[in-house]
Image: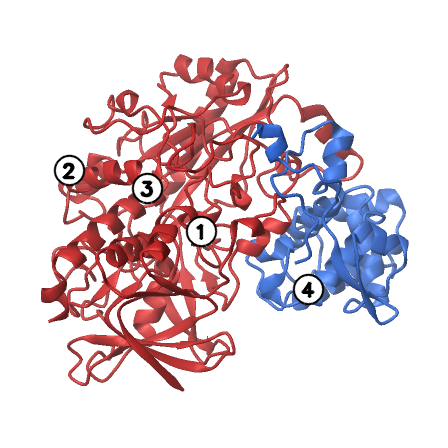
Amino acid sequence: MDDIERRSFVKGALGALAFTVGGAQVMLTPRDAHAQGVPFRTLTPDQVETLEAVGEAIVPTARTAGIANFVDQQLSIPADEALLEARILNVRPPFANFYRAALGAIDRASQTRNGGRKVAQLNDAEKHAFIDAMRQNRLDGWQGPGQGFVYTLLRNDALDVVYGTMEAYAALGVPYMAHIAPTKKW
Amino acid sequence: MATHEKVDVVIVGAGASGSVYAATLSKAGKKVLLLEQGPDWQLTDLISSDVWGRRIRPAGAPFLLEGKNPYGYAGQAGWGVGGAALHYFANFPRLLENDFKMKTEHGRGLDWPISYTDVAPYYDKVAQEIGVSGDAKAEEIWRPAGQAYPMPPMKTFRNGEIWLKGFKDVGIRMVPAAVGMNSVAFKGRAACIYDGWCHVGCPIGALANPVVTYLADARKAGAEVRPHSTVTRVLTNAAGSKVTGVEYYDEKKEKQVQEANVVILAAWSGQNPRLLLNSATDKHPKGLANASGLVGKYTMAHSGSGTWAIFDEDVENHMGTIGAQFMSYERYGKTAHKDAFGSTFIVGGNALKLSDLAGIANARPDIFGAALPEFIKRVRRGLTRINAFAEGLPNIENRVELASEKDEFGMPLGRIVHSFDQDAAKIWDANFEEGLKIAKAAGAKESWSARGAMATIHLMGGTIMGTGAGNSVTNSYGQTHELPNLYIAGPSIFASAGASNPTYTIFALSQRGSEQLAANWSAVTG
């Protein structure tokens, strides 16, 4: 068998995940789930807003790539089935506890620093300055998981949905070369 | 609670070491059962994706992580059959002679109760058994001669070759890396196609993971794998003189007892001590095999000093394996770095993916916002990396112990306490400095150190081998000093860490231990 034939170049993305739409389970990519406005299961509207704002500010296009839908869907499944970066960064399950604490800490710190405004309400320059301070553990009065660690984890969640896909590789001209393409339901 | 038909051997964990024991003993005609905490993965489960590859990383009860340099196990350890070796890099350097007599030769660390010559035949045997690609002759500038590897070296790519001038200029000889991968078809397994997905599992079997090697052999010889089985205790007879089996929880979370003539703990350096400590009885109040008080002690890790560089050409960084193309023991002497102590093992050349911790986007974790896509676009052709792994010395304060908090089965969580000492920190720094010199000499356009928190790689120790119950938990075969039919397998029996990736040594020691057990079956079980 030819080497190239042995690989599977199935068009796919992060892989389809099980989302619930109208009471029925459908297989969607996080990007599709975002585009279709799939309801969130675990994250609150405030948490979604913050996660999307921070994710987008760290990795452009993370919002439309479905960062919040990806994280929310993953928080709704058992931890031993999860695909989140949290799993390999030694975050203790249930992972929802980490995200609640991290996103809450971000908004509190933003409100303290920016006259009561949450991070989603900041302009681009303010968001950038806020995240740069968070990255370096320099936000005063922070209460939550380590600032730098929160930055690292959310940055990687955003990278997953934006750059962990076959489309991203193709857009950059980097051969993906899958043995088994990521389309299978977990 | 159900009790199952007694078996000859119950093995806790179906990873690298457990699979070797299972293969040897089942081929010797023993009835072997492997109890594996995670799933029974098939090759078709190994999806080529950094995101989906997280399924084969640890789950189950977490370890509490403490110390100055907490041990970051979750990205490295395993979950399910194959264990960590289902997704390892398969770099196969050996420990060298100087690793085994460090206390004698330098007054530092610990001696092993065996020497390199005791292990060397098993390195050779493993190579022939599961397939190693490399150039053994080239390695013999640093180690005694042995058998040739059964396969020639792997292909190299520009992302590795481009570093060679730099290494040469700073006086570091590089040789083809020894890897547990197929450079050519081997024993019915396909040759590697160099697409760099080794770290999420190789579904064509070109990577010598246990599922396609030892575990496959064991199954053919009749061994049973019982997945989703979480062992919580090793059981002993009333006199406390022998082990009689294990207690575990099945997939339905119901308690079971499995009786066996021999118990082998092959559950990783974190879990082996946890199980021994949780198996305390009135005859073994400190835990099994723990009269010395050393169960859980002397855990060790490697540090990693990565150097990134951008070259002004396409280095084909999407091609290759996640393991190394070139390797060197040139800094392996314990005093190779001035004012520091411990070995360093150097590798160069590996494939890069876009995302995840070791990917292109994380080469500069400080970059975010609009600058990030610009960075990725700018470096995607010319970025490459080398790594130096360094030894952490055995320190009794680095340990696995039981916490007061319990898991869903009522078993106390394990706590891993780990701090690097000053020597490890000095070597880490020295390796960064040398990496930048190498990059400059290689003609890199830009280079930088992958500094951050001092990374911990490969957990070893915790049930160290030694000459007797006063200074160790097991003998050189992994047989516990106090309970003759209780064996421990894997990196937890290492008496020192060296700087080499540990899995080749894990396979070799498991081969040696399992053959000793098979040869002495009557004495062990009598």
- As drawn, is B451 to the left or to the right of B286? right
Chain of the residue on which disc 1 is drawn: B
Q: Colour of chain B?
A: red
Pointers 3 and 4 in contact (C-beta within 8 Å): no
Q: Which residue is mark 4?
A: A143
Q: Which residue is mark 2?
A: B117
**Which amino acid, by three-letter code, is at mark 4?**
Gln
**Which amino acid, by three-letter code, is at mark 3?**
Tyr
Is the residue at mark 4 from the same chain as the one at mark 2? no
Residue B40 placement (x, y as % from top left): 49, 60
Is the residue at mark 1 from the same chain as the one at mark 3? yes
Judge the density around disc 1: few (<14), some (14-19), many (≥20) Cα neighbours within 10 Å. many
Quadrant location of residue A3?
A: top right
Q: CA distance from mark 3 to mark 4?
A: 44 Å
Q: Quick one: A128 or A61, which is closer to the camera?
A: A61
Q: CA distance from mark 4 to mark 2?
A: 55 Å
Judge the density around disc 3: few (<14), some (14-19), many (≥20) Cα neighbours within 10 Å. many
In the rendered image, the quadrant that contains the C terminus of chain B is: bottom left
Q: Secondary structure at mark 4?
A: loop
Q: Quick one: B108 or A172, which is closer to the camera?
A: A172
Q: Which residue is mark 3?
A: B504
Q: Which residue is mark 1?
A: B84
